[in-house]
Amino acid sequence: MPLQNRVGPTGQILAIPARGTMTGNRGIIHGPDRMLATKRWSHKAWICCELHWQGRKRQVMTGRNWTELFFLDEAVAMSAGHRPCGYCRRTAYVRFVDAWEAATGLRPKAPEMDAALHPARVTRDRSQVTHQARIATLPAGAMILHDNAPHLVCAHVLRPYAPNGYGAQVPRARCGDVTVLTPAPMVAVLDNGYRPVIHSSGL
């Protein structure tokens, strides 16, 4: 039976067979039975990590170090509020910090980014924070709701999200407001040059 450890663009954590191409964590949120209760984070450092790194392997949700979560790709991880890990994804992390500095004028440390991201991604009752934006202003890599379903924003089209990959492209409107799933600070980072890793189905 699949474990409840697959994160979607709306922040939901589901029990589905599809594993994804990236992993990450937000602290320990599982119990000894490898099940989630109501907790959805134990600290504000929500990170996105390499799925394969230095040949290391571990049985998920067994230890008490963290709860392994999985994402289709980095665009989905960012939509759910996860930034690059500064350890296993050091190069991506530095690029993310560079883009954050370009957006804000300040070069942050990881805890400062986490503190700014947290209220922009989730409420105290665990609901995802969304915001409105003009679709024409959104950078590639952001995730939005289109026809009440998550879609990846590409340069000229949208791609509907599914757990195993993105669907066939649909037209991207040139004007109008949309509901943005990707937290506003993440959108600013994308808008200032950060390019997330995208699943092959979305390229």
Image: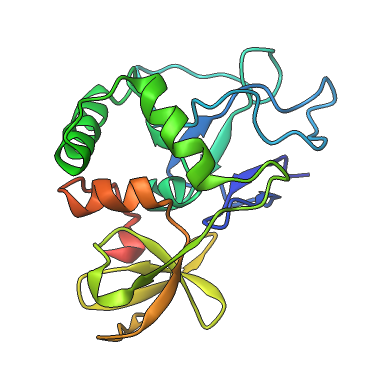
| Residue 40 position in % (x across, y down) | 69, 36
> Which residue lies at the image location 46% right of the left edge and 51% below the top edge?
72
Instruction: Give the vertical position of 167 relative to 68 (above or below).
Output: below
> Which residue lies at the image location 39% right of the left edge and 18% below the top edge?
55
| Residue 141 position in % (x across, y down) | 30, 58
Residue 167 in sight here? no
Report which quarter residue 167 is drawn in: bottom left
Q: Is residue 151 left or right of residue 189?
A: right
Instruction: Give the vertical position of 31 relative to 71 (above or below).
Output: above
| Residue 203 position in % (x across, y down) | 26, 64
Q: Is residue 21 left or right of residue 194?
A: right
Q: Is residue 13 left or right of residue 201?
A: right
Residue sticking out furthest to the top? 64
Number of numbered discs overlaid on the protein picture:
0
Q: Nearer the viewer, residue 16 or 193?
A: 193
Q: Nearer the viewer, residue 60 or 135?
A: 135
Quarter in which the N terminus is drawn: top right
